[in-house]
């Protein structure tokens, strides 16, 4: 399986299983607090293409860096916009979202705020941001030399060597070259938990499946015996 195929396979898995798999592999990179515009957003995954937002004025404000970066994008890519997490202005609206969709991208993540919420819901293109603001930028900042090379998103620096996975629970960044291994682990965890859930629905509690009574009894004899160790020994842990 190619890296690109693995990234697309992520779209079949909830983001929680992707983060579980990353934890198992010693990786991290999820965007806390970012949410989709409208629940039930289409789940997507793709290669990150990034930009740092540099506000302009007048007619130039309608031609922001988004249009330059998407010119060289491939269908299925995901646009990641760094506006420093600002909440005092919106850095994307309906025109930039329409242009991004027309370029064949799969979604947009904004480290900042959006506007034109009603129009964006009508457009239906997956956009994740930290909130809405009616105000566009009133500042005029110079464009940095690396404006199209990388983006900050919370605690993370994201570049074209990364993949993006997003659903109603939030967004996850993963190294592209680690995507196949993450996918394999996520599938295994997902399958295990679905089997456990099916057994609970059939009347066998998770406590029974994981022999929780045995754990409590052994912990009574061995105070240092941890639940994580117990789960590993019976094959019920997701970490290993």
Image (tube, rainbow, N blue to C red):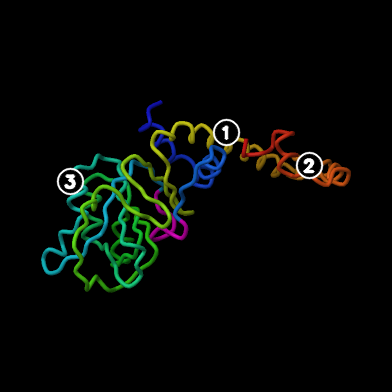
| Rendered location of residue 88, percent (x, y) | 32, 73
Q: Is residue 197 left or right of residue 166?
A: right
Counting residues from the start of the chain, the first of labels 1 and 3 encountered is 3
Residue at the spot of label 3: 71
Residue 225: x, y in percent?
79, 43
Q: Is residue 230 left or right of residue 36?
A: right
Q: Which residue was labeled with disc 1?
A: 188
Stretch in magenta: 32-42
Could you classify mark 2 by the number of other residues whose Cα lies within 10 Å: few (under 14), some (14-19), or many (20 or more)? few
Distance (Cα) linking label 3 and label 2? 56 Å
Q: CA distance from mark 1 to mark 3?
A: 38 Å
* Residue lying farthest to the left in this orientation: 59
Name the N-terminal-most of marks 2 and 1: 1
- Mark 3 vs mark 2: give the one in front: 3
Q: Secondary structure at mark 1?
A: helix
Of label 3 and label 2, which has the lower sequence position?
A: 3
Q: Find the distance from the CA under tag 2 to the CA under tag 1.
A: 21 Å
Query: Residue 132, relative to residue 123: is it above or below?
Result: below
Q: Magenta-highlighted stretch: main secondary structure?
A: loop
Q: Is residue 230 magenta?
A: no
Horizontal and vertical percent position of residue 200? 71, 44
Marks 1 and 3 in Cβ contact (< 8 Å)? no
| Mark 3, other Cα within 10 Å: few <14 / some 14–19 / many ≥20 | few
Q: Is 150 drawn above or below residue 129 in the view shown?
A: above
Q: Quadrant of the N terminus?
A: top left
Where residue 134 sits: x, y (%)? 29, 73
Most extreme residue toward the right, as rendered?
221
Which quadrant would residue 6 be assigned to in this image? top left
Instruction: Name the image quarter holding the C terminus.
Output: top right
Residue 208 image label: 2
């Amino acid at each position: 399986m190619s890296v690109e195929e693995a990234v697309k396979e992520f779209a079949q898995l909830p983001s929680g299983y992707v983060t579980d798999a990353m934890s198992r592999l010693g990786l991290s990179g999820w965007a806390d607090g970012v949410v989709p515009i409208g629940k039930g957003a289409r789940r997507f995954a793709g290669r990150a293409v990034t930009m740092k937002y540099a506000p302009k004025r007048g007619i130039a404000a309608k031609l922001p860096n988004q249009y330059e970066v998407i010119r060289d994008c491939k269908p299925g890519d995901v646009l990641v916009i760094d506006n420093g997490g600002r909440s005092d202005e919106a850095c994307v609206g309906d025109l930039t979202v329409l242009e991004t969709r027309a370029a064949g991208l799969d979604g947009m993540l904004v480290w900042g705020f959006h506007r034109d919420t009603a129009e964006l819901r009508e457009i239906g293109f997956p956009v994740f941001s930290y909130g809405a603001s009616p105000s566009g930028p009133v500042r005029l900042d110079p464009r940095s030399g690396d404006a199209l090379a990388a983006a900050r998103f919370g605690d993370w620096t994201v570049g074209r060597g990364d993949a993006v996975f997003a659903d109603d629970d939030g967004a996850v960044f993963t190294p592209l070259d680690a995507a196949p291994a993450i996918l394999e682990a996520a599938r295994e965890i997902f399958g295990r938990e679905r089997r456990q859930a099916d057994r609970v629905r059939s009347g066998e509690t998770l406590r029974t499946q994981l022999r929780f009574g045995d754990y409590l009894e052994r912990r009574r004899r061995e105070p240092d015996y941890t639940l994580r160790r117990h789960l590993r020994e019976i094959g019920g842990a997701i970490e290993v």
